[in-house]
Amino acid sequence: MATLAGKVALVTGASKGIGAEIARELAAQGAAVVVNYSSSKAGADKVVADITGKGGKAVAVGANVADPADVVKLFAEAKKAYGKVDVLVNNAGIYEFAGIEEITPEHFHKQFNLNVLGLLLATQEAVKLMGSGGSVINISSIVSTTALPQTAVYSATKAAVDAVTRSLAKELGPRGIRVNSVNPGMIETEGTTAANITAHDGEFRKLTEAQTPLGRIGQPSDVAPVVAFMASSASGWVTGEEIRVGGGFT
């Protein structure tokens, strides 16, 4: 069932990992998708090919959402391609772990500029194209409330994302725009694999799985359908909420 038929969705950071799977799922539900990427054009082009190869609509647009000028260009390209935006998924983000002795201004600003400022800049432009209604889904994390050692800055960015979500839900609600966050737990992606976070024999993965009632870490395919639901009219009475997708990890 094409629950998003006729809708246009823009997914930031969609060249790989969770963002790529979200883009594919939204397209499978009938949306035309703008696949944003910052550095991996090849990855974004593959996602577009995956979508169009199944009869869907998608275009890849490069932009660093932490750069205000890039964000304006991104939404100009979205408007040029499809004329509007109905759904914005603020997925672009980075994580860098550091103990208190290693935290630097660069470490702080790099994460806040993308994870928080970039989200605000993208939403600012998206609402101009949403008309009288739309859905903004912010990809947060369970670490916004379940912080782990050496994640002080990253956890703070995700706590900020949740706060922004609640505030914008109240601000944009009168305009028919819903704002929610989806908060994944540990997800196995290219990035977490490269960083050795989700290695199958790694102690961090084993510890997480032992504390997760459903007994495993997540996959991008666990997150994408939840985002699609939040983008659809089936969640039309839901705004300002944080939806945890973490297998019960607390």
Image (cartoon, rainbow, N blue to C red):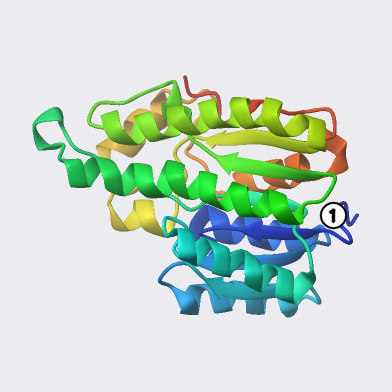
Q: Secondary structure at mark 1?
A: loop
Query: Which quarter of the figure has residue 11?
Result: bottom right
Q: Left or right: 28 with respect to 123? A: right
Total marks in image = 1
Q: Describe residue 46's horizontal placement relative to residue 241 as left or right.
A: left
Residue 240 % position (x, y)? 67, 26
Instruction: Give the x, y percent position of residue 45.
Output: 56, 79
Q: Name the residue located 66 percent from the left edge and 34 percent from the top edge.
A: 180
| Residue 221 visible in the snapshot | no
Q: Is residue 214 above or below residue 37?
A: above
View extreme (left): residue? 101
When asked about the image quadrant of residue 153, the answer is top left
Please tell me how crowded label 1 is: few (under 14), some (14-19), or many (20+) other residues with Cα within 10 Å: many
Location of residue 10 in the rendering, given as x and y in whole percent from the top left corner:
66, 59
187 or 179, which is in the foreground? 179
> Is 159 on the left-hand or right-hand side of 59?
left
Three-letter residue code for mark 1: Leu
Picture coordinates of residue 163 (x, y %)?
A: 52, 26
Q: Is residue 1 left or right of residue 157?
A: right
Residue ID at (80%, 61%) = 31
Pick the front one: 200 or 158: 158
Quadrant where the image shows the N terminus = bottom right
Decide: is 71 above or below 160: below
Residue located at (44% from left, 41% from top): 116
Residue beneath disc 1: 4
Name the one closer to the observer, 179 or 80.
Answer: 80
Q: Is residue 138 at least partly visible in the picture?
A: yes
Q: Residue at x 33, y 29 (%)?
A: 207
